Protein backbone atom coordinates (compact mmCIF):
# COMPACT_ATOMS: atom_id res chain seq x y z
CA UNK A 1 0.00 0.00 0.00
CA UNK A 2 1.32 3.48 -0.87
CA UNK A 3 1.38 6.56 1.35
CA UNK A 4 -1.61 8.04 -0.45
CA UNK A 5 -4.72 7.06 -2.36
CA UNK A 6 -5.98 8.70 -5.54
CA UNK A 7 -7.40 12.10 -4.72
CA UNK A 8 -6.13 15.05 -2.73
CA UNK A 9 -4.59 14.95 0.71
CA UNK A 10 -6.64 17.27 2.94
CA UNK A 11 -5.34 18.41 6.32
CA UNK A 12 -8.07 19.78 8.57
CA UNK A 13 -6.00 21.87 10.94
CA UNK A 14 -3.50 22.99 8.33
CA UNK A 15 -1.45 24.99 10.82
CA UNK A 16 -0.87 21.99 13.11
CA UNK A 17 2.76 20.96 13.45
CA UNK A 18 1.90 17.27 13.20
CA UNK A 19 -0.56 17.87 10.39
CA UNK A 20 1.94 19.77 8.28
CA UNK A 21 4.69 17.24 8.99
CA UNK A 22 2.40 14.44 7.81
CA UNK A 23 1.37 16.49 4.78
CA UNK A 24 5.02 16.79 3.71
CA UNK A 25 5.36 13.02 3.83
CA UNK A 26 2.21 12.47 1.79
CA UNK A 27 2.88 15.36 -0.60
CA UNK A 28 5.06 13.88 -3.38
CA UNK A 29 3.02 13.71 -6.58
CA UNK A 30 -0.22 14.76 -4.89
CA UNK A 31 -2.49 17.75 -4.52
CA UNK A 32 -2.61 18.92 -0.91
CA UNK A 33 -5.29 21.09 0.68
CA UNK A 34 -4.51 22.83 3.98
CA UNK A 35 -7.71 23.84 5.79
CA UNK A 36 -7.37 26.16 8.78
CA UNK A 37 -8.56 29.40 10.32
CA UNK A 38 -6.95 32.47 8.79
CA UNK A 39 -6.12 30.46 5.69
CA UNK A 40 -4.54 33.52 4.08
CA UNK A 41 -1.73 33.27 6.65
CA UNK A 42 -0.41 29.80 5.78
CA UNK A 43 2.51 30.82 3.57
CA UNK A 44 5.12 28.92 5.59
CA UNK A 45 3.05 25.75 5.64
CA UNK A 46 2.28 25.97 1.92
CA UNK A 47 5.96 26.49 1.13
CA UNK A 48 6.98 23.44 3.20
CA UNK A 49 4.43 21.16 1.57
CA UNK A 50 5.23 22.40 -1.93
CA UNK A 51 8.95 21.88 -1.29
CA UNK A 52 8.19 18.30 -0.23
CA UNK A 53 6.93 17.51 -3.74
CA UNK A 54 3.23 18.35 -3.86
CA UNK A 55 1.98 18.97 -7.40
CA UNK A 56 -0.28 21.72 -6.04
CA UNK A 57 -1.08 23.19 -2.64
CA UNK A 58 -4.37 24.94 -1.90
CA UNK A 59 -5.72 26.56 1.25
CA UNK A 60 -9.27 26.64 2.59
CA UNK A 61 -10.83 28.50 5.48
CA UNK A 62 -11.81 26.05 8.22
CA UNK A 63 -13.11 26.60 11.74
CA UNK A 64 -13.42 23.23 13.48
CA UNK A 65 -15.90 24.61 16.02
CA UNK A 66 -18.31 25.81 13.30
CA UNK A 67 -20.00 22.45 12.84
CA UNK A 68 -22.45 23.60 10.19
CA UNK A 69 -19.56 24.50 7.86
CA UNK A 70 -18.01 21.02 7.78
CA UNK A 71 -20.36 19.52 5.23
CA UNK A 72 -20.25 22.45 2.77
CA UNK A 73 -16.44 22.60 3.04
CA UNK A 74 -16.01 18.89 2.26
CA UNK A 75 -18.48 19.20 -0.62
CA UNK A 76 -16.57 22.19 -2.02
CA UNK A 77 -13.22 20.40 -1.82
CA UNK A 78 -14.64 17.36 -3.61
CA UNK A 79 -16.26 19.52 -6.28
CA UNK A 80 -12.97 21.30 -6.98
CA UNK A 81 -10.41 18.51 -6.53
CA UNK A 82 -12.30 15.23 -6.73
CA UNK A 83 -12.95 12.63 -4.05
CA UNK A 84 -10.65 13.02 -1.06
CA UNK A 85 -7.85 10.46 -1.01
CA UNK A 86 -6.56 11.02 2.52
CA UNK A 87 -8.13 13.23 5.18
CA UNK A 88 -6.05 14.16 8.22
CA UNK A 89 -7.84 15.51 11.29
CA UNK A 90 -5.07 17.51 12.94
CA UNK A 91 -6.93 20.08 15.00
CA UNK A 92 -7.41 20.18 18.75
CA UNK A 93 -6.76 22.10 21.97
CA UNK A 94 -5.12 21.14 25.24
CA UNK A 95 -6.98 23.72 27.28
CA UNK A 96 -6.33 24.79 30.86
CA UNK A 97 -7.34 22.06 33.31
CA UNK A 98 -7.30 24.35 36.35
CA UNK A 99 -9.53 26.86 34.61
CA UNK A 100 -11.83 24.13 33.30
CA UNK A 101 -12.49 22.89 36.84
CA UNK A 102 -14.04 26.26 37.70
CA UNK A 103 -15.25 27.50 34.32
CA UNK A 104 -17.82 25.17 32.76
CA UNK A 105 -17.77 27.11 29.50
CA UNK A 106 -14.04 26.44 29.13
CA UNK A 107 -14.49 22.76 29.95
CA UNK A 108 -17.25 22.51 27.36
CA UNK A 109 -15.13 24.34 24.78
CA UNK A 110 -12.30 21.80 25.16
CA UNK A 111 -14.69 18.89 24.73
CA UNK A 112 -16.42 20.62 21.81
CA UNK A 113 -13.20 21.00 19.83
CA UNK A 114 -11.50 17.75 20.82
CA UNK A 115 -14.56 15.49 20.62
CA UNK A 116 -17.76 17.00 19.24
CA UNK A 117 -16.12 18.74 16.27
CA UNK A 118 -14.08 15.64 15.50
CA UNK A 119 -17.17 13.43 15.56
CA UNK A 120 -19.03 15.84 13.30
CA UNK A 121 -16.26 16.03 10.69
CA UNK A 122 -15.56 12.30 10.86
CA UNK A 123 -19.21 11.59 10.12
CA UNK A 124 -19.20 13.99 7.15
CA UNK A 125 -15.99 12.47 5.77
CA UNK A 126 -17.08 8.87 6.32
CA UNK A 127 -20.33 9.50 4.48
CA UNK A 128 -18.56 11.12 1.52
CA UNK A 129 -15.88 8.43 1.30
CA UNK A 130 -18.38 5.61 1.69
CA UNK A 131 -20.27 7.02 -1.29
CA UNK A 132 -17.02 7.16 -3.28
CA UNK A 133 -16.04 3.64 -2.22
CA UNK A 134 -12.53 4.72 -1.23
CA UNK A 135 -10.52 7.05 0.97
CA UNK A 136 -8.47 7.16 4.13
CA UNK A 137 -8.92 9.06 7.37
CA UNK A 138 -6.20 9.75 9.93
CA UNK A 139 -7.39 10.47 13.47
CA UNK A 140 -5.16 11.61 16.34
CA UNK A 141 -6.08 10.27 19.76
CA UNK A 142 -3.63 10.25 22.69
CA UNK A 143 -2.21 8.17 25.50
CA UNK A 144 -4.27 10.56 27.65
CA UNK A 145 -7.40 8.80 26.38
CA UNK A 146 -6.29 5.36 27.58
CA UNK A 147 -7.30 6.05 31.16
CA UNK A 148 -8.41 9.49 32.24
CA UNK A 149 -6.16 11.09 34.84
CA UNK A 150 -7.13 13.60 37.48
CA UNK A 151 -4.47 16.04 36.24
CA UNK A 152 -6.03 16.49 32.77
CA UNK A 153 -9.40 14.78 32.94
CA UNK A 154 -11.23 17.24 30.68
CA UNK A 155 -8.82 16.80 27.77
CA UNK A 156 -8.36 13.11 28.55
CA UNK A 157 -12.09 12.42 28.58
CA UNK A 158 -12.46 14.03 25.16
CA UNK A 159 -9.64 11.87 23.78
CA UNK A 160 -11.13 8.75 25.35
CA UNK A 161 -14.44 9.54 23.69
CA UNK A 162 -12.75 10.16 20.35
CA UNK A 163 -10.81 6.91 20.66
CA UNK A 164 -14.02 4.96 21.24
CA UNK A 165 -15.92 6.71 18.46
CA UNK A 166 -13.11 6.03 16.00
CA UNK A 167 -13.02 2.34 16.93
CA UNK A 168 -16.74 2.05 16.26
CA UNK A 169 -16.51 4.05 13.03
CA UNK A 170 -13.69 1.79 11.82
CA UNK A 171 -15.89 -1.26 12.32
CA UNK A 172 -18.84 0.45 10.63
CA UNK A 173 -16.69 1.20 7.58
CA UNK A 174 -15.34 -2.33 7.25
CA UNK A 175 -15.79 -3.55 3.68
CA UNK A 176 -16.66 -0.12 2.27
CA UNK A 177 -13.21 0.70 0.86
CA UNK A 178 -12.65 3.39 3.49
CA UNK A 179 -9.64 2.95 5.79
CA UNK A 180 -9.29 4.63 9.19
CA UNK A 181 -5.95 5.02 10.97
CA UNK A 182 -5.99 5.88 14.68
CA UNK A 183 -2.74 7.43 15.91
CA UNK A 184 -2.09 7.37 19.66
CA UNK A 185 0.95 9.50 20.52
CA UNK A 186 2.27 10.21 23.97
CA UNK A 187 3.55 13.60 25.07
CA UNK A 188 4.49 15.56 21.94
CA UNK A 189 7.08 18.31 22.30
CA UNK A 190 5.72 21.25 20.33
CA UNK A 191 3.68 24.44 20.43
CA UNK A 192 0.76 22.87 22.28
CA UNK A 193 2.97 21.71 25.15
CA UNK A 194 5.34 24.69 25.23
CA UNK A 195 6.52 25.39 28.79
CA UNK A 196 5.70 21.87 30.03
CA UNK A 197 8.37 19.38 31.06
CA UNK A 198 8.47 16.44 28.63
CA UNK A 199 7.02 13.20 29.95
CA UNK A 200 8.73 9.80 29.57
CA UNK A 201 8.55 8.39 26.02
CA UNK A 202 7.99 11.85 24.58
CA UNK A 203 7.95 12.37 20.85
CA UNK A 204 8.05 15.20 18.31
CA UNK A 205 5.70 16.18 15.47
CA UNK A 206 8.19 14.76 12.96
CA UNK A 207 8.35 11.38 14.70
CA UNK A 208 4.57 11.18 14.98
CA UNK A 209 4.25 12.00 11.28
CA UNK A 210 6.86 9.37 10.37
CA UNK A 211 4.99 6.71 12.32
CA UNK A 212 1.63 7.71 10.81
CA UNK A 213 3.02 7.63 7.26
CA UNK A 214 4.52 4.17 7.84
CA UNK A 215 1.25 2.93 9.29
CA UNK A 216 -0.63 4.18 6.22
CA UNK A 217 1.76 2.35 3.92
CA UNK A 218 1.27 -0.86 5.87
CA UNK A 219 -2.51 -0.55 6.10
CA UNK A 220 -2.47 -0.42 9.90
CA UNK A 221 -5.57 0.48 11.87
CA UNK A 222 -3.80 1.74 14.99
CA UNK A 223 -0.31 2.99 15.79
CA UNK A 224 1.24 4.01 19.11
CA UNK A 225 3.98 6.64 19.03
CA UNK A 226 6.44 5.53 20.24
CA UNK A 227 5.54 1.82 20.11
CA UNK A 228 6.38 1.06 23.79
CA UNK A 229 3.40 3.23 24.80
CA UNK A 230 1.18 0.25 24.04
CA UNK A 231 2.72 -1.60 26.99
CA UNK A 232 2.54 1.51 29.17
CA UNK A 233 -1.18 1.76 28.40
CA UNK A 234 -1.67 -1.75 29.79
CA UNK A 235 0.17 -0.74 32.94
CA UNK A 236 -2.04 2.35 33.23
CA UNK A 237 -5.17 0.21 33.22
CA UNK A 238 -3.78 -2.02 35.98
CA UNK A 239 -2.62 0.78 38.28
CA UNK A 240 -4.67 0.94 41.52
CA UNK A 241 -6.91 3.98 41.71
CA UNK A 242 -5.40 5.35 44.92
CA UNK A 243 -2.06 5.58 43.13
CA UNK A 244 -3.55 6.71 39.82
CA UNK A 245 -5.26 9.76 41.25
CA UNK A 246 -1.95 11.06 42.59
CA UNK A 247 -0.09 11.01 39.29
CA UNK A 248 0.97 14.54 38.34
CA UNK A 249 -0.15 14.16 34.71
Image: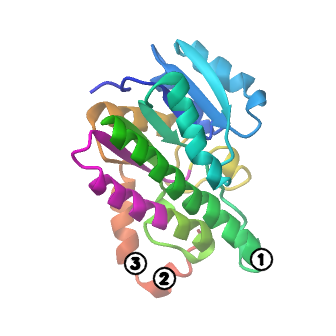
Q: How far from the left and from the top, in percent, is residue 3?
A: 37, 26
In the image, the segment drawn in magenta is 160-187
For the question of whether residue 50 can be seen, the reply is yes
Q: Residue at x 32, y 42 (%)?
A: 179
Closer to the eye: label 1 or 3: 1
Q: Secondary structure at mark 2?
A: helix
Question: Is the residue under label 3 in contact with that under label 2 (CB below 8 Å)?
Answer: yes
Left or right: where 40 falls relative to 63: right
Q: Secondary structure at mark 3?
A: loop
Q: How far from the left and from the top, in percent, is residue 183?
A: 42, 48
Disc 1: which residue: 103
Disc 3: which residue: 239
For the question of whether residue 224 can be seen, the reply is no
Is residue 47 magenta-colored? no
Closer to the eye: label 2 or 1: 1
Which badge, 2 or 1, comes first in the chain's sequence?
1
Disc 2 crowd, CA 10 A, few/some/many (<14, 14-19, 20+): few
Q: Secondary structure at mark 1?
A: loop
Which badge, 1 or 3, comes first in the chain's sequence?
1
Question: Is the residue under label 1 in contact with that under label 2 (CB below 8 Å)?
Answer: no
Real-space Cα separation, disc 1 to disc 3, in angstroms: 30 Å
Disc 2: which residue: 243
Real-space Cα separation, disc 2 to disc 1, in angstroms: 27 Å
Q: How far from the left and from the top, in percent, is residue 41?
A: 78, 29
Q: Quadrant of residue 166?
A: bottom left
Is residue 172 magenta-colored? yes
Q: Which mark is residue 45?
A: none
Residue 243 lies, with reference to residue 175, above or below; the image says: below
Front-most of residues 25 and 137: 137
Amino acid sequence: MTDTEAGPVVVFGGRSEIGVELATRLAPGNTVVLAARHADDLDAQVTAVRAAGATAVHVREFDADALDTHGPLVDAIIAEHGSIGTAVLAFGVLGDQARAEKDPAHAAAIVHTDYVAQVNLLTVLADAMRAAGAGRIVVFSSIAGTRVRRANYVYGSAKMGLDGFTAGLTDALHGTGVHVLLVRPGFVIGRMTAGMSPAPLSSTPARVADAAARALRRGRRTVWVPAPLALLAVAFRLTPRFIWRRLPR
